[in-house]
Image (cartoon, rainbow, N blue to C red):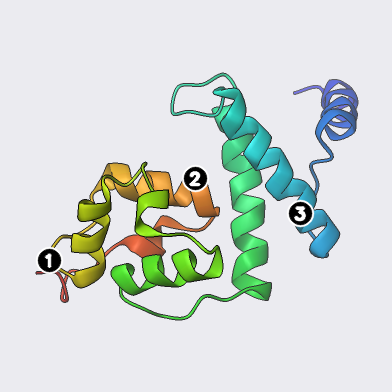
Amino acid sequence: MNLNDIRSSWAALQGATGIDPIHDEAGYHRMVDLADALIESGLAGKNGELSGLFGLVSGLIADYDDKHHPQPALPPREMLRFFMEQHGLSQAALPEIGSQGVVSEILSGRRMLNTRQIAALVARFHVSADLFIEPADQAH
């Protein structure tokens, strides 16, 4: 491990991305913008070239959110409803989850979110997957 190489690479990465621990809302929004750009680029997927960077940025965002934007403890379907209201989304505005009927079934409790849907919600809202996972003792 050559610390001089790491130092110069880190400086280049910081200069290109602005990545740094988040200390305030401006830093938070900078990291959210970077996460959005990584998602939109298509390089942040599971096997994408920048998936590791996306993981680091998501972790920074999640840590800041946990400390400064705590989410209410709600069942997954209520968390989905909360985020929909917070972002002014209709059931039809979530095609990554499924049709309007599928979203309706989830919100009514007739259907649980699956792993693909949870991953889509995490990417869309930049939150922890834990918010959308039904505790084992409460699962249908």
Q: Place residue 82 in its image quadrant.
A: bottom left
Of label 3 and label 1, which has the lower sequence position? Answer: 3
Instruction: State the CA–CA distance, disc 2 to disc 3.
Output: 15 Å
Q: What residue is drawn where x is 72% and y is 44%?
A: 33
Of 82 and 5, the residue lying toward us: 82
Secondary structure beneath dot 1 equals loop
Left or right for 26, reference 101: right
Q: Which residue is mark 2?
A: 123
Of 111 and 59, the residue lying toward us: 111
Q: Which residue is mark 1?
A: 110
Residue depth check, mark 1 versus mark 2: number of the one nearer the observer: 1
Q: What residue is drawn where x is 37% and y is 41%?
A: 96
Q: Is residue 21 visible?
A: no
Q: What residue is drawn where x is 38% and y is 65%?
A: 80
Q: Quadrant of the N terminus?
A: top right
Picture coordinates of residue 94 (x, y %)? 39, 49
Residue 29 badge: 3
Q: Amino acid at mark 2?
A: Ala
Q: Amino acid at mark 3?
A: His
Q: Quadrant of the C terminus?
A: bottom left
Q: Amino acid at mark 1?
A: Arg
Picture coordinates of residue 67 (x, y %)? 65, 73
From what the image shows, is residue 75 above or below residue 80? below
Instruction: State the CA–CA distance, disc 1 to disc 2.
Output: 24 Å
Q: Are marks 3 and 1 in contact (CB under 8 Å)?
A: no
Left or right for 54, reference 139: right
